[in-house]
Amino acid sequence: MRAGLYIEAEQVKMDLIDKPTPQPGEALIKVSFAGICGTDMMIYAGKHPRAKAPLAMGHEFSGVIEEINGGFESFSVGQRVVIEPTLSCGECEACRAGEYHVCRTLKLIGIDKHGGFAEYVAVPLNRLHPIPDALSDAHAALTEPVAVAVHTVRRSNLKVGDNVIILGAGPIGLLIGMVAKQAGAGQIIISDISPYRLGKAAELGFTALDAKTVNVTEEARRLTGGIGADVVFEVAGTQITAKQMIETVKIQGQIVVVSVYKQAPTVDLAAMHFREISMTTTRCYTSGDFAKAIRMMESGSLDVSSLISHQLPLEKIAEGFELMHNPEESLKVLFRP
Ligand SMILES: [Zn+2]
Ligand SMILES: [Zn+2]
């Protein structure tokens, strides 16, 4: 079968690999759509600690069940599904506590084993979620990043009417803004250095700050009456935003760190201490968050259409990754294997 493979740093290509055989308890999924995520970009850069080449990346994907190995009444051949890509061990202290998404040895389909940039993927049945009729295969492929945003907002202290600052207007930053709006946020301020992404943020009704032309800290303070935000979401993963997150949050406000930092930032704990600021981190999502993400898209309360910038055939895998390199041209790139 055809697969879009990570070969080595900065090199991807379409090649043939063996079609997987579903093991007992697994289904063979014919992939419909698969999105490129920031994590895939980290693999592409050769900086992911676990991904081993050659690898069919892609952990954000939807598809159709082609074959099921073993009896499982909840699913049937021909059914449209979206894949929750996390694989937990079931034995560590987190798993025993039911917190599978922070499993000590958490693995992901598309990082630790072949994923959705391929014609077929074998997936454990308990990782499948049915796609409701009202939800398209392309939109369903965005369930994973939507679930990240749902999990992030649910882990925050956000209350109705709260002012929110989001540092970073990539797909996850924009989705956090959309979910925060659903959760009743008041003013939603979002910063980035890409005019294209800031344009999307403005279209979605957020107050967009161009970090290249304005002082984000001063502007965020001005927009919040000199007080700062109730909740700041750090989604850019840079030293600059790690400083801004403390400067833009209000006294006793909350910082939620969503970013995966390539390099550990310096964080001014002294500045946090004097203002009794709290900080929390987030990772992935629970199965419940994943199901909520599907329901929010199904009901139309959360529309991801504007986030999909490109739909490409698998043959154009290299082009897809080049597009993602340029935040002036792309937001979410989907492949159609
Ligand atoms: Zn992702
Ligand atoms: Zn575990």
Image (cartoon, rainbow, N blue to C red):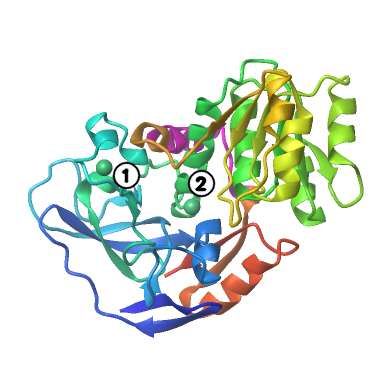
User: With 330 as the anchor, is 43 left or right in this view?
Assistant: left
At 40% from the left and 38% from the top, the residue drawn is 290
Whole-angstrom CA distance, mark 2 to mark 1, is: 21 Å
Question: Does mark 2 have its CB less than 8 Å from ligand 1?
Answer: yes
Range covered by the magenta-colored residues: 291-305
Mark 2 Cα-neighbour bin, 10 Å: few <14, some 14–19, many ≥20: many
Q: Nearer the viewer, mark 2 or mark 1?
A: 1
At 62% from the left and 16% from the top, the residue drawn is 159
At 36% from the left and 39% from the top, the residue drawn is 102
In the image, residue 114 sits, relative to residue 308, either above or below, namely: below
Residue 34 included in the magenta stretch of the image: no
User: With 318 as the anchor, is 76 left or right in this view?
Assistant: left
Mark 1 Cα-neighbour bin, 10 Å: few <14, some 14–19, many ≥20: some
Q: Residue under label 2, please give it.
A: 145
Residue 302 included in the magenta stretch of the image: yes
- Location of residue 105 in the rendering, given as x and y in whole percent from the top left corner: 30, 49
- The number of numbered badges drawn on the structure is 2
**Label 2: which secondary element:** helix
